Image: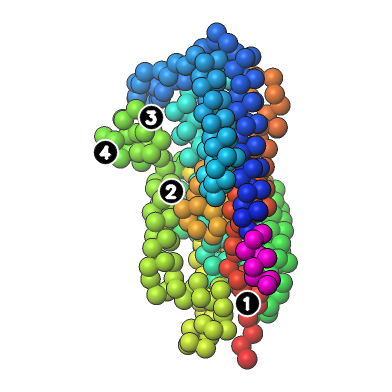
Amino acid sequence: MAESALTQAQPKVRSSQSLIAGTISLVIAGLLFLLGLNAVGDISKFVLTSQRAGVTIAAPDLVLPTGISLFILAFLVAVLGGYQIVSGSKRVSLFVGLSAVVLVFGFLIWATHGKSLNLTGMLVSSVIRATPIALAALAGIYSERSGVVNIGIEGMMLMGAFVSVVAASVTQNLIIGVIAGILAGMLMGALHAVLSIKYRVNQIISGTVLIILGLGITSYLTRLLLDVYPDQLNSPPSAIPSLQVFGLWRIPVIGPVIFNQSSLIYLLWVMLIFTQVLFFRTRWGLRVRSVGEHPKAADTLGINVFRTRYLSVLISGAIGGLAGTYISLGVAGQFTEGISAGKGFLGLAAMIFGNWMPGGAYLGALIFGFFDSWQEKLSILQIGIPVELLAMAPYIATMIVLSGFVGRSRMPAADGVPYQKE
């Protein structure tokens, strides 16, 4: 009887979600139409030519009639919304996602009316800004897939950023700096592992300790050492240079975005693919996932739960340290207090956004990176809207995802639960 009632309720829930999704699409269509009315007769110009390594990569500009383009986009989104309402399609996330993408693109068209925007530069900036967030998300995946919550990635990033700059400055060697940053993050991971696995400290508290420790130590040592001896301790030889892939980097638009990036960005892409294969195509990955889902059953089958979790958290710390190293050596070229600027937390949001999957987490990181770049570009265009409001968009999208409307994220069943061998 109860099962029958539940079965009858499910179509109603899906119908309600479809109705809401369709309504959202119609609202977006209305917004695009109003923006179009505000820019009838104007032209939006997107510059695709870019400058990389002192070379001009020429490409024809993308010139669009602002009003007409927005009216077309409004019509397409309205059709999507109407179809969603009438058909009651179960693909709620697909329709809402498409409508959101069209809204962002339409807003860019409107913001550029009568002006120009270097679209290639914006895409390059988005990839660069997404990288530390993606590394932080990857660090979270390794830890939480084994059942250990790690909100201390921010602290790992700060320690990695600080130690890498000092090591690179003292030795005048970027490779040594990168290795030192990874080891610093791993040391923080070891501390988290001991507290949360051996002593079964609440993992949220343990992660908070890492954040406070990382922020406190780096701030203190910056004022004590780096501010006093900047030339000796805070002057690495250079920022990590871009790596130009054969002649592919000269391809318009695609070349600068994909084939002319920092070596650490290429390393990230390799790590994403490797992690996907490792977790879902190897025995070790199966063991990690089983420990994160049901540690008691895994222990019964002869899997060492403690060793698996220790190793996973250490890997998480190493990747967190690499994320901080990328910020200091790969982008800034020096260390400043609080240089991670909350990107560890954004990485955790991207991880949840991607449902603890490498590909999904990177997509979430790209969204944050894009809106970070968009905030900067639109502030230059001076469109009359506070950029702080524009910067809220990715966080609103994350809240929608976490609320379960677009698709419920499912964390590993034993995530955050200390294991005690009987």
Disc 4 residue type (three-letter): Phe
Q: Nearer the viewer, mark 3 or mark 2?
A: 3
The residue furthest bottom is 422
Closer to the chain start, of discs 3 and 4, is 4
Disc 1 residue type (three-letter): Ile
Q: Residue at x 73, y 67 (%)?
A: 205
**Mark 2 crowd level (few <14, some 14–19, many ≥20, 10 Å Cα):** many
Q: Which residue is mark 4?
A: 246
Q: Which residue is mark 2?
A: 264
Q: Are marks 2 and 4 in contact (CB under 8 Å)?
A: no
Q: Write down the quadrant of residue 159 in the picture.
A: bottom right
Disc 3 residue type (three-letter): Val
Disc 2 residue type (three-letter): Leu
Per the model, the C-alpha gap separating discs 3 and 4 is 16 Å
Per the model, the C-alpha gap separating discs 1 and 4 is 47 Å
Q: Write down the quadrant of residue 341 in the picture.
A: top right
Q: Which residue is mark 3?
A: 253
Identify the secondary structure beneath mark 4: loop
Tell me, yes or no, whether the highlighted magenta stretch contains residue 212: no
Per the model, the C-alpha gap separating discs 2 and 1 is 31 Å
Identify the secondary structure beneath mark 1: helix
**Mark 1 crowd level (few <14, some 14–19, many ≥20, 10 Å Cα):** many
Q: Are marks 3 and 4 in contact (CB under 8 Å)?
A: no
Closer to the chain start, of discs 2 and 4, is 4
Q: As rendered, which of 212 and 412 lies closer to the eye?
A: 412
Q: Which residue is mark 1?
A: 197
Where residue 194 appears, x then y in whole percent?
62, 75
Identify the secondary structure beneath mark 3: loop
Where residue 20 appears, x then y in whole percent?
66, 42
Where residue 106 appears, x then y in whole percent?
55, 26
Extent of the magenta region: 1-9
